[in-house]
Amino acid sequence: MSSKDDIIKIRVTNEFKEQLKSLAEQEGLNMSQFVLKYLQPVVATKVNNKMNHEKIESRAVATDDKMEKVKANLELRNIKYKESISYKIKNIFTKG
């Protein structure tokens, strides 16, 4: 476990500080422990959501690239089919 050497200072109203202190005491914690107890899960969720968002975005880009390749392949097949003899013969008999 890493040591807790860093300090974060925040500015709050005296009223908020007293509310925080009172809630911490009710749970038998000091203010740092209380804040960490409720803040760590929020931070973990935010980090997890960010990583998941990045994964989803990456997959969406990859899927879009694959769809473009499929589209190009279908267009190429369609061109080749229209150039084929079977397509030309089929058109001769269906036009008239």
Image: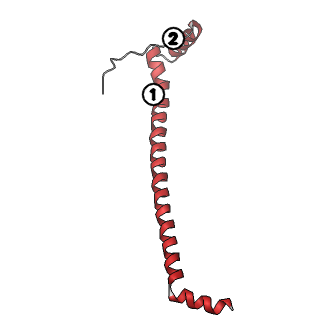
The crowd level at tag 1 (other Cα within 10 Å; few <14, some 14-19, many 20+) is few
**Label 1: which residue?**
40
| Quadrant in which the N terminus is drawn | top left
Name the residue that disc number 2 marks: 11
Please tell me how crowded label 2 is: few (under 14), some (14-19), or many (20+) other residues with Cα within 10 Å.
few
**Residue at image location 51% in from the left, 15% down from the top:** 24
Residue 63 appears left or right of 14: left
Q: Nearer the viewer, residue 84 or 30?
A: 84
Kindly report the distance in space between the C-alpha atoms of the residues bearing marks 2 and 1: 19 Å
Identify the mark at residue 51; answer none if there is no mark: none
Pointer 2 or 1: first along the chain: 2
Residue at the (54%, 81%) spot, across then down:
82
Q: Considering the numbered disc 2 on the image, is that residue within a helix, a strand or a loop?
A: loop
Q: Is residue 40 above or below residue 27?
A: below
Image position of 82 with respect to 51: above or below: below
Q: Name the side, left or right, on which 76 lies relative to 7.
A: right
> In the image, what residue type sits under mark 2?
Arg
26 left or right of 32 in image: right
**Kind of residue sitting beneath label 1:** Gln
Q: Element type at marker 1?
A: helix
**Residue 10's x, y, as percent?**
48, 13
**Quadrant including the C terminus:** bottom right
Q: Position of residue 44 (x, y in %)?
A: 45, 33
For the point 46% across and 43% down, the residue is 54
Pinpoint residue 12: horizontal percent, then vertical percent.
Answer: 54, 11
Residue at position x 48%, y 25% from top? 39
Residue 43 x %, y %: 47, 30
Q: Quadrant of residue 47?
A: top left
Nearer to us in this view, 22 or 74: 74
